[in-house]
Amino acid sequence: MELLSIVVPCYNEEQAVELFYPELVKVLDTMDVDREIIFVNDGSTDRTLEKILALRDAHPGEVRCIDFSRNFGKESAMLAGLRMAKGDYVTVMDSDLQDPPANLPVMLKMIRENGDDVVGTRRVTRAGEPKIRSWFARQFYRLINHFTEVEIVDGARDFRVMKRYVVDSVLSLEEYNRFSKGMFAWVGYQVEYLEYENVERVAGETKWSFFKLVRYALDGFIEYTEAPMQIIGRTGGVMSFLMLIEMIVLLVRALSGHTFSGTVLILSCVLFMGSILMLALGIMAEYLLKTYAEVRKRPHYIVKNYYE
């Protein structure tokens, strides 16, 4: 039979792991595929690794584990899992059951019968999320899709079933700063989405604070569009042109004998232009930091132990 690899990034999910595994296996037992379940312990400080190893000991040959030396983030955990996965089909799932295992048979059926290369999942609601966070998320997708060359689907999850060659294409992208939603969209292929209602996590607390999500969104925006640099450059050009016109008008009026005090106006112009320059420098610094990270060629993660 064909092999399905399930990659499960985990960070401080000791409660969720024990609930996730039985639900997943109950669904997998109804499917006509062999399976391997790859847990990636992303530097957890609780008993997550202990729980994973207990599952591995109870189910030898089915459960595998990658243990990081510290927390490197979900993107790195996903990358490590995808590199280890050997399946004809590969999926990435959260251990908190917000990615319902019951969707797996439907997704596999779609990918087999419809000739899709990828079947992803997309939340049609954000029930249970703070309203302000949901609003910012919608604005992010609207903004980034206005400027990027590929569409990043609003509500799309990392939970998707991919054929082997799609995974190989994603792994061929070697950039250090990885934004999975953008990478999945960039490699292309025929993608179909399975829509479902939002599911709240079964245990524990989310590791994504509002500010971490903002940072993640900013990383994606910088990785997949040059719009910030272009906007700043065009704004600077327009403002410079307006300032030149103003200087010419002031000079003409001065030569015509008009007297006026321009101290406040000049000070306002200086402060306004200074703020634009500071904003521009801040955006340029973000791009330079990304370039610096690429140039250093540090590994995405360090593995402390492999548990086959």
Image (cartoon, rainbow, N blue to C red):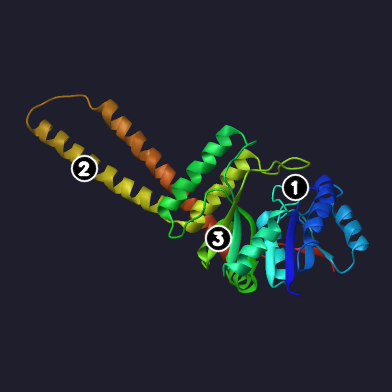
Give the residue type at disc 2: Leu
Give how far across and how far down residue 161 sits, in percent: 65, 63
Disc with the residue nearer the chain's start (1 vs 2): 1
Residue type indicated by callout 3: Glu
Q: Nearer the viewer, residue 129 or 305?
A: 129
Q: Residue at x 73, y 61 (%)?
A: 7
- Residue 34, image x and y in percent? 78, 70
What residue is at 76 percent from the left and 42 percent from the top?
202
The one of 214 and 26 positioned closer to us in this rendering? 26
Q: Answer yes or no: do the residues labelled 2 and 3 have beta carbons within 8 Å?
A: no
Residue under label 3 = 192
Residue type (three-letter) at the residue carrying disc 1: Asp
Question: Which residue occupies 56% across, 33% down?
Answer: 132
Q: Indicate which disc, 1 or 3, sits on the residue closer to the N terminus.
A: 1
Residue designated by label 2:
244
- Kindly indicate whether the residue at mark 2 contacts the one at mark 1 (C-beta within 8 angstroms): no
Are the residues flagged by discs 1 and 3 in contact, CB closer than 8 Å? Answer: no
Furthest-left residue in view?
A: 256
* Res 198 → quadrant: top right
Q: Secondary structure at mark 3?
A: strand
Local packing at callout 3 (Cα closer than 10 Å; few below 14, some 14-19, many 20+) is some
The answer to whether residue 105 of the structure is visible from this angle is yes
Query: Which residue is nearer to you in this view: 209 or 5?
Result: 5
| Distance of label 2 from label 3 (alpha carbons) | 53 Å
Mark 1 vs mark 2, foreground winner is 1
User: Going by the image, does 136 lie left or right of 112?
Assistant: left
Dot 2 falls on a residue whose secondary structure is helix
Mark 1 = which residue?
A: 96
**Alpha carbon distance from label 1 to label 3:** 24 Å
